[in-house]
Amino acid sequence: MKQILIIYTSIGLGHKKIAENIGASLKEDLNNSVELLDLYDVESGGLKKYGEKLYYILLKHSPWIWEFFYTNKVFIEVTLPFRTFVASFNASKLEQVLKNKHYDIVISTHANSSAIISYLKKKGIYTGKFVIAFSDYHLHRYWLYDNANLYLANINEQKKEMVSRGIDPEKIAVCGITLQKQESLVDKQKVRNNLGLKENDKIVIVFAGSRGFGMNSDIIDQLVKINAAILVVCGTSVEIKERLTQKYLQTTNVKVLGYSNFRELISIADIVVSKPGGLTVAESLEQNVPILVSHFLPGQERLNIDYLKEHNLVMPLSLDFYEAVKDEIQTGNFRSSLKDSPDLKRIVQYGEVVREAISKL
């Protein structure tokens, strides 16, 4: 039996959910024993504490600085050789985890955990297989390590770029964004009833993001004029939820929600207005629900947009959210275009490729 550890970080819900989805898929093979670990449950030193704080400060107050760090080729080239050295200062507790139990395979879904595993593998502390999973629709050089045994890529373009950088194509499995199969069909009427929605209500879901970065309430102000129920999902951000709840307290067609079952909500949606996070996009496309990009994080999500626009997987970007949403609700044109999209079918996967690739290690 293969002992598999999947490591994620709790910065953003996407990395965690993708780890959970991959884990659920691998558990379908009874020859696998799978454990999940939040890196920050064991590594809570200064680099984590202050690095995370700096990240959120930059996103909120100086997003252009994060964009520079993420995309500037000179900065990346200069800092690339120091990744594992920096990771070594935050590796002691994960090292102990790997010493306490033998794992045949460690899968990392975040760059921070990948750097630590790479360091421990180079030092001979961890001797098993090292797998890296992606969660976006572009490629960053910080995700790549010479001692990785396998990459779980999301799109063919990632594989092509890695091969052009000298990575053996046999070490790359293109598996889309791994989702969990739903055990039963969603009772859409029950979801509507629980939210106090009428059977014929058109539904617009606005994902503000788990921390609300970049979401402008002016967008919601445009949408409330539409003859539709507007569900604003604030994720784990209590502050954003409280603020928006107070603002739209007297607006009858707006409901402000906290952390919710995204896939259930999407099942009743006519359109999703959201930032283009890898998992949110995949879960929307799974149910052929159109996505209108309202805002995005600098760096990773801006690059996601490039791919999604090129392959007609998100609606054309617009500053007039009222007209764009109203037109789609009335016509359903973009939703119709998604039904036969080959790119959609490649992105939305349920773990078959992942299981096959892992079984070969």
Image (cartoon, rainbow, N blue to C red):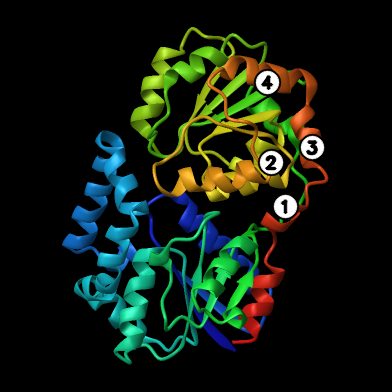
Instruction: Report the residue at 50% width, 37% height from top.
Output: 275
**How far separated are the C-alphas under marks 2 and 1?**
9 Å
At numbered mark 3, what does the secondary structure look like: helix, strand or loop?
helix
Residue with the mark numbered 2:
312
**What residue is pinned by disc 3?**
337
Tell me the kind of residue under disc 2.
Answer: Asn
| Residue type pointed to by label 3 | Ser
Q: Find residue 241 and report its horizontal and vertical position in percent.
A: 41, 27
Q: Which label belongs to residue 197?
A: 4
Q: Which of the two residues, 93 or 320, is positioned nearer the viewer here?
A: 320
What amino acid type is highlighted by mark number 1? Asp
Q: Position of residue 213 (x, y in %)?
A: 37, 35
Q: Position of residue 318 (x, y in %)?
A: 57, 24
Q: Where is residue 329 shown, x and y percent of the image?
A: 73, 21
Earlier-in-chain disc, 4 versus 1: 4
Check whether the beta carbons of the residues at disc 2 and disc 1 lie within 8 A of each other: yes
- Of badges 3 and 4, the one in the foreground is 3
Q: Amino acid at mark 4?
A: Leu
Query: Is the Cβ of the residue at disc 2 closer than 8 Å to that at disc 3?
Result: yes
What is the C-alpha distance between the residues marked 2 and 3? 9 Å
User: Relative to 83, is 250 above or below?
Assistant: above
Q: Residues within 10 Å of mark 1 (few under 14, many from 20)?
A: some
Instruction: Using the numbered discs, state the Cα–Cα distance from disc 3 to disc 4 in whole angstroms.
Output: 27 Å
